[in-house]
Image (cartoon, grey):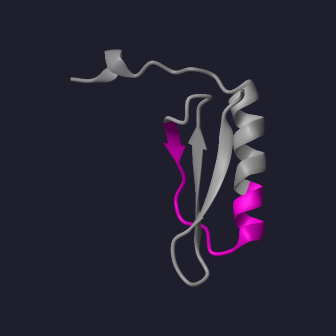
Amino acid sequence: MAGRFEIHRTGDESYRLRLTDAEGNIVAVSPTFKSLSLLRDGIKAMRENAATGIVVDLRQQQA
C-alpha cells in the first residue's frame, strides 16, 4: 500500500494536510489552508515537487 494524503479540519473553515507512509506514520504536516481548493493546490504542488525535488544537505553549513 502506498502512502496517503489525509485532510483534517482544524477550524470552522481551515484545513491541514498530513502525508503518511504505507504503515500510517506521519511523514509531513502542512500549514493551515483557508479552503479546500487551496489545500488541493497544496497537494498538487507537493506531488510535483516531491517527484523532482533536489536533496540539499545543509549539515555542512552549520557553524
Q: Nearer the viewer, residue 59 or 41?
A: 41
Q: Is residue 42 above or below residue 48?
A: below
Image spot of residue 40 (x, y percent):
76, 59
Image spot of residue 63 (x, y percent):
21, 23
Q: Which residue sits at x=52%, y=59%?
A: 31
- Residue positioned most to the top: 60
Image spot of residue 49 (x, y percent):
71, 35
Quadrant containing the N terminus is top right
The number of callouts visible is: 0
Q: Nearer the viewer, residue 60 or 27?
A: 27
Q: Which residues are drawn in magenta?
A: 26-41
- Residue positioned most to the left: 63
Q: Is residue 32 above or below residue 4?
A: below
Q: Quadrant of residue 19 in the image? A: top right
- Residue positioned most to the bottom: 12
Q: Which residue sits at x=62%, y=75%?
A: 34
Q: Which residue sits at x=59%, y=31%?
A: 21
Q: Which residue sits at x=69%, y=42%?
A: 46
Image spot of residue 62 (x, y percent):
27, 24
**Magenta-span inclusion, residue 37:** yes
**Magenta-span inclusion, residue 36:** yes
